[in-house]
Image (cartoon, grey):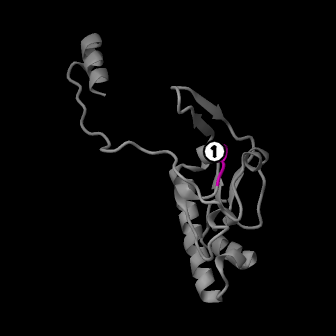
Amino acid sequence: MFKIIDLLRAKFPEFKDSAIVSSAINAGIRETRHLIGKGTATLQSFLDGTTYPCPAAHSAHPMDIHDPKSAGQQLIRLENNAYVPCDALVCEQLDNLIVAGRCLSAEAGPYASLRVQATLMSTGEAAGLMASLSRTSGAPVHALDETALSAMIAERNFVL
């Protein structure tokens, strides 16, 4: 950043008085580990626009896949609406574990689309509703009534 601002000041008169006011104190980590979920957001489901009886979130952001070994980037625009299934938030191997955000069950391609703030916020709200429904119904999260969960999501007016 500092080298770029020095270059801009030296080469372009418009930038002679420019300054860096602030910057993030940490690098933004795009992706870490993912849950092995009861379901998974797959590349094929995102490309096909697969719908689910109970989606946790809608994703419309293009897949921007960054090559970790170079500065290369692949951008894949979604031709269809893409959805994160609710069961991608539910752990396959542990009872009653729900996750949201960047650790949900997804392949790398769709994760490059769904990792944006609005989509991940929807997964967080869906996870909260799943926990609430599990508590009130007494059903474990892997066996929730999808009709009841869908109704709760619709009542909250999620953008799906």
Residue 12 point in image, percent of width and height: 29, 13
Is 113 magenta? The answer is no
Q: What residue type is labelled 1?
A: Ala
Indicate whether 49 appears above or below 135: above
Query: Which residue is situated farthest in the top direction here?
Result: 11
Q: In which quarter of the image is the C terminus?
A: bottom right
Indicate whether 146 appears above or below 20: below
Residue 61 point in image, percent of width and height: 61, 44
Q: In which quarter of the image is the N terminus?
A: top left
Q: Disc count in the image?
A: 1
Which residue occupies 53% across, 58% down? 101
Which residue occupies 62% across, 72% down? 94
- Overall secondary structure of the magenta section: helix
Q: In this rendered view, identify the residue nearer to me: 93 or 29.
A: 93
Q: In this rendered view, identify the residue nearer to me: 97 or 114.
A: 97
Indicate whether 70 appears above or below 141: above
Is 109 magenta? The answer is yes
Query: Which residue is situated farthest in the left direction here?
Result: 17
Region rendered in magenta: 106-110
